[in-house]
Amino acid sequence: MKIVMLGAPGAGKGTQAKMIVEKYGIPQISTGDIFRANIKNGTELGKKAKTYMDQGALVPDELVVDLVVDRLSQDDCKNGYVLDGFPRTIPQAEALTAALAAQGEKLDYAIDVEVPDENIVNRMSGRRACVNCGGTYHIVFNPTKVEGICDACGGKLILRDDDKPETVQHRLSVYHAQTQPLIDYYKAEGILKAVDGTKNMADVFADITAILGE
Ligand code: AP5
Ligand code: MG
């Protein structure tokens, strides 16, 4: 099962992708997580990506596409995957379609998690991310057992640099200009499914499993 998660920053793509991983046993491939891991490890890619990410801009397509295509060729992707944060532009989507077609493959579902802009800024200011494992929480909607400490690994929780309200506004406008057109792209491919992302996390996931099957 090959799935793409679509949706604005903070719509819950990562949250739902993790639940898909647990239920369906396919890997989550999050370009945002890959870049953040590279930043943490001080790699050349991380240094380049950081300048764009801190401003809420997109990392250039040429730094993203080969990275993802290479990742999809790894063994754990044989039975499918859930892409979270990629593709994010029409050229990225076209490159993915072409790379899959070269292997005689195609995507099965593009799931659009719909959340209006006015809900997003609140969600982001309450999000906390683990510096160690990247786990994501929310101070109101998904709190940790001990404040400031990751349930999964005991790491310290922080507010992501790009989750400050002024950067979130910019990420939203970048989303509308560059990523939202993918909704029509995948509609035309006949694989678009929309879910209401304003429901609670479990109810959103129930709607997703109704699409993917038990
Ligand atoms: P990325 O990490 O992908 O960020 P994003 O798309 O902005 O999305 P987020 O991770 O912020 O949100 P999400 O939808 O995953 O929401 P989450 O589940 O965490 O990308 C970061 C940057 O990297 C980009 O700006 C860009 O610079 C670069 N980049 C990445 N990929 C790229 C690409 N392909 N091309 C170019 N550049 C790229 O949920 C948000 C919060 O809400 C959490 O606190 C969560 O607990 C809470 N929450 C989730 N669901 C619910 C719910 N149903 N109800 C209440 N709260 C909820
Ligand atoms: Mg995410």
Image (cartoon, rainbow, N blue to C red):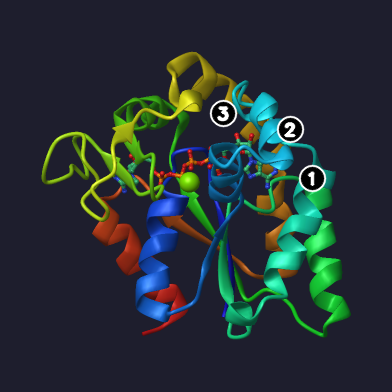
Q: Which residue is mark 1?
A: 63
**Residue name at image x 61 percent, y 26 percent:** 56
* Quarter of the figure with residue 59: top right
**Residue name at image x 84 percent, y 49 percent:** 91
**Residue name at image x 23 percent, y 48 percent:** 154
- The reply to whether discs 3 and 2 touch (Cβ–Cβ < 8 Å) is no
Left or right of 43, for residue 199: left
- In front: 212, or 85? 85
Left or right of 157, for residue 81: right
Q: Which residue is mark 2?
A: 48
Indicate which disc, 2 or 1, sits on the residue closer to the N terminus. Answer: 2
- The reply to whether discs 3 and 1 touch (Cβ–Cβ < 8 Å) is no
The image position of residue 10, as x and y in percent, is 44, 39
Is residue 58 visible in the rendered structure shown here? no
The residue type indicated by label 2 comes to: Lys
Q: Which residue is mark 3?
A: 172
* Quarter of the figure with residue 160: top left
Determine if the C-beta at disc 1 is less than 8 A from ligand 1. yes
Element class at badge 3: helix
